[in-house]
Image (spheres, coloured by chain):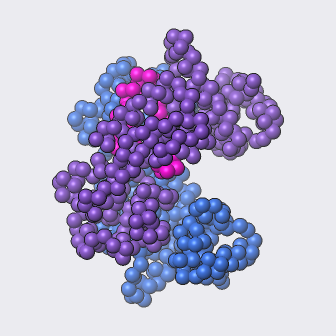
Chain colours: A purple, B blue
Amino acid sequence: MLDYKLLEALDAVAASGSFEGAAQRLHLTQSAISQRIRQLEERSGTVLLVRDTPVRATAAGQKLLAHVRQVRLLEGELHEALEMVVTDWLTLRIGVNADSLALGLVAAITPSLQAARILLDCVVADEAQTLDQLRSGEVLGCIGTQPQQIAGCGVIPLGVMQYVLVATPEFVARCFPAGLGTDALADAPAAVYGQQDSIHRRWLREAWGLQQGYYPCHVIPDSTALFGAVCAGLAYGLVPQPQAKDALERGVLCELAAGEPISLPLFWHHWSRQTAPARVLADAVALFASKLSD
Amino acid sequence: MLDYKLLEALDAVAASGSFEGAAQRLHLTQSAISQRIRQLEERSGTVLLVRDTPVRATAAGQKLLAHVRQVRLLEGELHEALEMVVTDWLTLRIGVNADSLALGLVAAITPSLQAARILLDCVVADEAQTLDQLRSGEVLGCIGTQPQQIAGCGVIPLGVMQYVLVATPEFVARCFPAGLGTDALADAPAAVYGQQDSIHRRWLREAWGLQQGYYPCHVIPDSTALFGAVCAGLAYGLVPQPQAKDALERGVLCELAAGEPISLPLFWHHWSRQTAPARVLADAVALFASKLSD
């Protein structure tokens, strides 16, 4: 078996960002920590930490850390099975899409998190990219768009998130007087979450043949700020239907392409070897999603 | 002088993410694009692009791209000085703190952006870290906490953002029955924006001697979601006063350490060689900030 004393030192350095912090945490001297890391690097034959400020794990180091996290989860389950009192919080790292966060995922699952003493560590990525984080072991579960399960993992359908194409009435009159069309879309400023791929960019590419760089585009990496900019008339946006509902009813926004929502089926992917707290989390996420897609 | 035909090819590949996209954009063949990039790499003696999907600039490539962007901005100013009609949108990349985005920065400056046909490309980072992006040429302006200007740049004070420490009354009764204290803070779950440094983590470290890893902590990289989680009673949070105002008045939240707001002076840092659109943007940001700190 691996030497978990060494792995614990690695985990402590990664969590605190320094050898000094790890030493404090494990009540050891800094030189004891250095020695353990050196031993671990010699045994694994590779560098595990980038000695920067803060200290970071290398790709190889991250693989070891993912393993430590899985072992800790299993230990958590063991404690529970033995009816030991769980005194520590358990941190679960998950991959989420920005829109789920903005629509109140965390607030909605708060009661489940509190009851199970779960700390969430959310990593935000595009729905199409979260699976890579699951594959690399960085997260133990994620919201993704792929229906097929990946090796070593299970999958739960979360329902379908509806997106609507919206802008202010003034914006529509100015930029889309004749409705949607390639020329109008190539001139009207869009608002997207990030430089990377997104549902809006995919829609422009697949439905209209417009590649990135061929349309004016504001990049606003905050869902709420993006929606606020659309309501202020800066741009048109492809946003989740529940986010736009009120503004549509009040006439602040109107729908471009009315009656044709763009659907995004979402799935919860998770490690097959799922602990009880991870199952609690998955159930809470599924309940939140079912309410959104109602 | 540099060969701007080659730099334009580099810019097109970086903007579209592929050699094919760049060829379409510049109405050239793909092999012409490849040849230009190769020439540029030979002359600069270094690899400029990572041939991945999408194609990305290396650190050296990014420096060249930052230069191209500066030249484009100067050209924009020239057009204006010559009273040429500006038909194209101008993209300005800026570094912003997440809280400014969440508090409606983009919506507030929309009229200025529209009038000057500015497209925003926001890069989110902690207030203490945005300056690095300015130094590297990645952004032309940023919101930061340092009052001193950096070489080649100017600085404008944006006023002081007040932060308040808040939680639901139930949370306070459960986790802080005797008020703030090291032991209570080491046990009560906090909510922070990211794994990296933040005003909340600095406060725990500097005011209470609590290092990262010594307190339970939810990581929620979305300001609105973080605030929603605090309102749902998941954690306590150190949030901007304007964000908490309504919830405090309605009694949904109450202040821990009432009457002692934590102040964060903010500054707009920008390249000294500022074009007219960049000045428009700086003025709009300063106006937004002055309203927030009123």
The residue positioned farthest toward the front in the image shown: A148
Number of numbered discs overlaid on the protein picture: 0
Q: Could you tell me which residue is drawn at 59 percent across and 20 percent down?
A: A75
- Assess whether residue B253 is covered by the magenta stretch: no
Quadrant of image for the N terminus of chain B: bottom right
Q: Residue A173 appears in which quarter of the rendering?
A: bottom left
Residue B145 or residue A226, whichever sits in front:
A226
Q: Does B271 sit left or right of A46 as displayed? A: left
- Residue A80 % position (x, y): 52, 15
- Assess whether residue A111 is covered by the magenta stretch: yes
- Residue A146 % position (x, y): 49, 47
The residue positioned farthest toward the left in the image shown: A250
Residue A21 or residue A149, whichever sits in front:
A149
The magenta segment is A101-130
Q: Evaluate whether residue A239 shows in this view.
A: no
- Residue A273 % position (x, y): 57, 28
Q: Could you tell me which residue is drawn at 39 percent across and 44 percent down?
A: A100
Residue A209 or residue A242, whichever sits in front:
A209
Q: Does A127 sit left or right of A262 as displayed? A: right
Q: Does B195 sit left or right of B162 as displayed? A: right
Q: Residue A65 appears in which quarter of the rendering?
A: top right
Q: Evaluate whether residue A109 shows in this view.
A: yes
- Residue A157 % position (x, y): 42, 39
In the image, residue B138 sits, relative to residue A62, either above or below, namely below
Q: Residue A203 appears in which quarter of the rendering?
A: bottom left
